[in-house]
Image: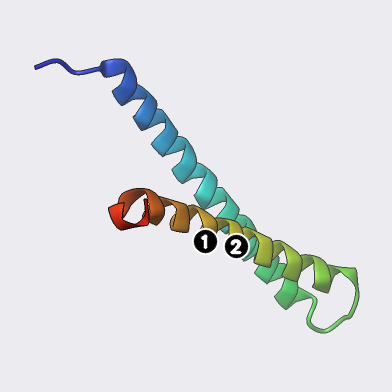
């Protein structure tokens, strides 16, 4: 039995990198929601910025999850 250790290392590195990236993007989305909550009393740019940041970050996380499901489920290919 022969293991391709280089390929296994690459898969591990990419998996860890993508996991960390998704967690950071999700945390930025939560930060956007916190900005939104903090700006409830006052109107202005912060309110729109927080909502936009949260929406884009959560949309990016959902896209990564959908792509992962696409790769796993063979009926989608």
Residue 2: horizontal and vertical position, in percent?
A: 14, 15
Q: Residue at x 53, y 57 (%)?
A: 63
In this view, the residue farthest toward the bottom is: 41
Q: Quadrant of residue 50?
A: bottom right
Quadrant for the N terminus, please: top left
* Disc 1 element: helix
Judging from the image, the colouring scheme is rainbow
Q: CA distance from mark 2 to mark 1?
A: 5 Å
Q: Quadrant of residue 27?
A: bottom right
Residue 48: horizontal and vertical position, in percent?
A: 82, 71
The residue where tag 1 is placed is 62
Q: From the viewer's perspective, is 10 left or right of 62?
A: left
**For residue 72, above or below residue 15:** below
* Disc 2 element: helix
Q: Residue at x 32, y 50 (%)?
A: 72
Are there few (<14), some (14-19), or many (20+) residues within 10 Å of tag 1?
some
* Proximity of marks 2 and 1: CB atoms separated by less than 8 Å: yes
- Give 67 or 32, whichever is nearer the viewer: 67
Q: From the viewer's perspective, is 42 left or right of 8?
A: right
Are there few (<14), some (14-19), or many (20+) residues within 10 Å of tag 2?
some
The residue where tag 2 is placed is 59
> How many numbered marks have been drawn onto this rendered protein structure?
2
In this view, the residue farthest toward the left is: 1
Q: Residue at x 48, y 41 (%)?
A: 18
Residue 38: horizontal and vertical position, in percent?
A: 75, 74
- Give 28 or 10, whichever is nearer the viewer: 10
């Amino acid at each position: 039995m022969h293991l391709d250790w280089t390929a296994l290392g690459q898969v591990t590195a990419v998996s860890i990198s993508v996991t960390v990236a998704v967690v950071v993007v999700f945390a930025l989305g939560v930060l956007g929601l916190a900005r939104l909550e903090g700006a409830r009393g006052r109107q202005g740019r912060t309110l729109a910025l927080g909502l936009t940041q949260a929406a884009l970050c959560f949309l990016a996380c959902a896209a990564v999850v959908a792509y992962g499901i696409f790769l796993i489920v063979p009926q989608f290919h």
